[in-house]
Amino acid sequence: MAIAVQAPVQTAPTARRGEFLRSMPLKAKVGGGILAVFVLIAIIGPAIAPYDPSAINATQSVALPPNAHHLLGTAVDGGDILSQLLVSIRGTVVLGVLTATFAAFLSVAFGVTAGFLGGVADEGLSLVMNVFLILPALPLLIIVLGFLPHSGQLPTALVLSILGWAWGARVIRAQTLTLRGRDFVAAARETGEPTWRLVVFEVLPNEISLIAANFVGTFLYAILTSVALAFIGVANLSSWSLGVMLYWAQNATAINIGAWWWYLPPGLAVAILGMSLVLLNFGLDELGNPRLRRSTKSRRRARGTKAWRPTDPTPVQRLEVAP
Amino acid sequence: MRFITRRLAFYVVAAWTAITINFVIPHLLPSNPVQVMMARHPEFPPSARRALEIQFGLGHQGSLLHQYVVYLGHLVHGNLGISVLNYPASVVEVLNNTVPWTLLLVGSATIISFVIGTLLGIFAGWRRGGWFDKALPAFTFVQAIPYFFLAELVLVLFSSDLHIFPAYGGYQLGDTIGFNGTFIASALTHSILPALTIIVTSMAGWMLQMRNVMITTIGEDFVLAAQAKGLSTRRIMFTYAARNAILPNIAGFALAIGFVIAGALVMEIVFSYPGVGYQLFQAVTNDDFPVMQGIFLAISATVLVCCLLADVVYVLADPRVRTRAAY
């Protein structure tokens, strides 16, 4: 990000974008790449699924291992695992995106308002945030979702985001507090900008990376929580998601009958998707905190020597500006 | 002191919120315990409905405010209602049978994972770029695996295939529960697998945060000054760098404990461990509202007490908060 700002203006936009991509930490690249694959599957998955995921074969009573017709084998009832996986990834990714989007709106609204207004409003809103932060989400979700009619993903995403926005709001509030006192905000205020313009055009653009990091974090929380809920049966079991797949596998004791092709794909899919989000978040963290990042120069030097020692100078990203 | 009083006021508000949510939820949901009881016991005559309504504290009892006051009164006297599933046992009896199991298992596993994770984080941060630090991205994978999925794999490997550890339950059926050798031994062997799973999955979080803060702290001038004084590496590592780097981890403990408990709930279901999570699962599958509410209250209370303890430790560990409010 720093490079994009300091690069000379005359550089062509494409070159600048390429440089920006190269300057991304490796973790962010790997995480973003894996996530892109999952998003792609979420978009085209149901279209390329070879079978109807819910189609069952009434004459079949054993789970078939992977074969030429069913690349990932079948469930006990003859359902094609590959098709189920492709369709389920869409369900889980959509739920994650919905939840993260709702939660992002809530945390920006609460965080920016509390941080910008300060005083009594800040005290009150902070109290609300901290209470939501401390309430045990999972038992509450089990109770509420267990009794809501399982009409679809929207209610689940809403409940998940209502219980998952507080952490982001706290971080954004803290950032807004520091931004509010900066000179450029004061300067904009002096020119007579109304408060909403100060918030939208001066404060928010400086919080984009923070909001993105929180989006990724909430995404992860939504996926892990919804999978856990579906696994214990608190979900709409007739619509496919990775958690629902695991529920049916567990229900048919897939692990005990050794049907690894049934329970491993959804479990690994959740783990890999989760890992990509964790890596992406670390990458965003490194982008924002130069101390966690090491310049290519110091990395090259470190290869020859031993591990970095505390007495070494703090590694700072060196900017090579093109002539 | 101001810090402590502010936090205490916050905990009072948080506890009140949890209690009120617990009161509001059943009023929003479409079903109630009496309907469930009538459905579960077709042999009950229709006239039993009124008796059950009185027993479960339902029916027409005036305004919502009046019901709220009655509910608070019951709560003060430790009356959480009657379980539908274990009728006529009270919710408090059900909790008495399940909470100690969870408290022992999750409590000890959390403390072990916090200590090990923090220690590993100190070493990874100190030897930045060393072999252990390079292996860290592997832990992000462990962190992202769903708790229960890992639990199932562990269960199959060590129990069904290798027959090293028992597959389910908290103790050998037939053993008398009490303070005797065979029971304690049996309870211990039953708790090893669930505890290991909790430790493995929750450790990575502590470790990664500790490592990152450690790296930032090591860059501070006072660490350099300590090094210049010629202090021993161990002393600088623990009493200078780690001593300061651990503060965010303690502050984060309050937030993480909720996640740990949530993960442990699902884990108990996989291992059929006789704790709160398994009881909650049974309550949900059997529409046992009063037990669900009781468990929610119990978990909320536990989380609040844990956070309070973390706050006290934080005040003891960081003298700065004693003079000014840190957050």
Image: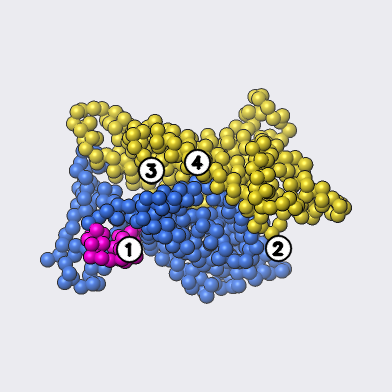
* Quadrant of the drawing holding the N terminus of chain A: bottom left
- Give the distance between the C-alpha atoms of the residues marked 1 and 2, in whole angstroms: 66 Å
Q: Chain of mark 3?
A: B
Q: Chain of mark 4?
A: B
Question: Marks 1 and 4, how far apart in space?
Answer: 34 Å
Chain letter of the residue beneath label 1 in the structure image? A
Q: Which chain is yellow?
A: B
Q: Nearer the viewer, residue A88 or A62?
A: A88
Find disc 2 in the rendering and name its residue.
Answer: A61
Magenta-drawn segment: A184-210
Q: Are marks 3 and 1 on the same chain?
A: no
Residue at the left extreme, as displayed: A323
- Depth check: give the residue in front, A80 or B75: B75
Query: Pointer 4: residues within 10 angstroms few (<14), some, or many (20+)?
Result: many
Count neighbours of disc 3 (C-alpha within 10 A) and say few if under 14, some if 14 to 19, many if 20 or more: few
- Residue at the spot of label 4: B11
Q: Are marks 2 and 3 in contact (CB under 8 Å)?
A: no
x, y (%) of residue A10? 16, 72
Q: Residue at x 40, y 33 (%)?
A: B1
Q: Residue furthest top?
A: B180
Q: Which residue is mark 3?
A: B327
Residue at the spot of label 1 = A195
Q: Which chain is blue?
A: A
**How far apart are labels 3 and 4 at the CA level?**
14 Å
Q: Quadrant of the C terminus of chain A?
A: bottom left
* Lower position in the chain sequence, tag 1 or tag 2: 2
Mark 1 or mark 4, which is nearer to you? 1
Q: Residues within 10 Å of mark 1 (few under 14, many from 20)?
A: few
